[in-house]
Image (cartoon, rainbow, N blue to C red):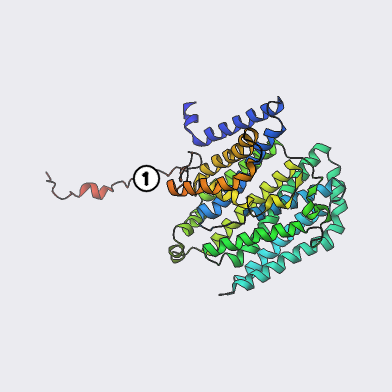
Amino acid sequence: MRQLLRNTNFTFILGAVLVFIVVQALISLGVLNAYWQGIIFWGAAITMVSLGLNLIYGFNGQFSLGQFGFYAIGAYASADITYRWVRNDPSALVVVIFGSILALALMFGVSAFLRRFYGVATLTKFLFNFLAAVLGFFLAVRFVNPAIGKVIYAALNALPSGISQQLIFFLALVGGATLAGIVSYLFGIPVLELGSDYFGIATLGFTIIVKVLLDNTDTILPFPEMKGARGMVGIPKWTTWPWVFICFMAVVLVMRNLIHSSTGRAILSVREDERAAELVGIDTASQKILAFVVGSVFAGLAGGIRAHDLAFLHPTTFGFLPSFNPLIIIVFGGLGSMTGTIITGFFWIFLLEGLLRLYLPEGFETWRFVVYPLVLLLMMLLRPQGLMGRYEIAFLRRPLPPLRVKEASPVQEVIPQAGEVTA
C-alpha cells in the first residue's frame, strides 16, 4: 500500500476520484445548491480556457488574447446543435460533425500536396486551406444533410432517451471543440507569422470580430435561433458534474502528456529561443500552430460545457473585457505552470463570483475592473513569476529517468590507471 501511495499516478487518480465522489455526494444531498453548482462548473470552464491559453502563451511563448473568441465559437456551435435537436432538427449536428470531418480531410490533403513544393507563400497556404474548409462544410450542407440527416435522427431516437441525450451532448461538445480548432488553424496560418506583440493585437481583433458577428447572427449570419444581440435562449441544460469532471480531466491529461512528449519539448523550445530551435531543425511554424490549435480546442470544449450550464448565451459574455480573465489567471498562477492555472482558475471564480458577490455591497461589480489592474500590477512588480512560478505537483511534473552509469569494460579493469603500481 505504501508503494502505491508513493506512485504519483495512483495518488493523483485516487485524489481525483475522491473529489468527484465528494462533490457528487454534496450535490445529491442538496448541500450544494444550484448557485454553488454553477460556480463549480464555471470554475472548471474558465480553468480549461486558461489551460489552453497557458499552453499557447506560457509554454509556447505566443501572447494571445483570442481565447474568448474560440470559447464563444465552441459555446454557440454546441448550443445550436442541441437547440435544433430538441426541436426535431438534426441539421446542425450533421453539418457540424460531417462538415468538420470533410473539412479536416480536405485540409489534410491540401497540406500534404503543398508540402511537395518548397517556399510556398503563407497566403497561398491560407487560401488553399480556407477553400478546403469551405468546400467541406458546403458538401455537408448541400449533400450530406439531405441524404442522411433523417436517417441519423431516426437511428439516435431509436435508442433509450437517456442514452440518446448523452450521445447528442457528447457529439455537440466534440463538434463545438472541433469547429473552434478548425477556425484557429485557419486563423493561425497567416497570423502566427507575426511577432508576439503583433500576434496579441491580431488575436484581440479576432475576439472583437467574433463578438460583433454574434451580435448579428440573426441579420448578417443565417442563424435566427441565436437571436443576435438579444441572446440565445432555449438551450437544453444538460451540463452535469460528471460531464464537467470528465472534460476537465481530459484537458488536464491531454495537456500534461503533450507537454512531456517530444512534441511538447519542441513547443517549449520555441518559447526559450525560436531561432535556436530553427537551427537545430525544429519546424517552429508547425509547433506554434499546434499549440494554438490545441489551446483553442480546450476553449471550445469549455464553451460547450458553459453554454449547457447557463442555458442562455449573450455576446457580451464573450466581449473585450471578459476576454482578459484567462490572461489574468495564468499570470497570477504562473506562466508555464498547470498547477498554478488550476488553483488560480477555481480560486478566481470562487472569490469574485461567489464569496465577494454574496457578501460585498451591491454595485461592487462595477469596481472589479479597477481592482483587477491594480492587483495585476502589484503582482507583476512584486512576484512577476506568479504565485506558483513554474512549480508543478508530482503528477504534472514528469520525473526524469535515472542516470545510466557506464560500466567499466573488462579491458579497462585490466589496464592500470595512472599512478597505480602493479604487482
Q: Which residue does the image show at 73% across and 41% down from the upper left?
A: 309
| Label 1 SS | loop
Residue 103: quarter of image: bottom right
Q: Is residue 161 visible?
A: yes
> How many residues crowd mark 1 within 10 Å: few (<14), some (14–19), many (20+)?
few
Q: Quadrant of the C terminus?
A: top left
Residue drawn at (69%, 54%) of the image: 178
Query: Which is nearer the eye, 406 or 108?
Result: 108
Q: Which percent across, then down, holds residue 129?
A: 67, 67
Q: Percent x, y for residue 394?
A: 48, 38
Q: Percent x, y for residue 201?
A: 58, 62
Res. 358 image quadrant: top right
Question: Residue 281 location, x and y as percent?
Answer: 47, 65
Name the one closer to the observer, 208 or 292: 208
Residue farthest toward the top in the current orientation of the protein: 29
The image shows a total of numbered marks equal to: 1
- Residue at 66% across, 46% down: 302
Residue bearing mark 1: 403
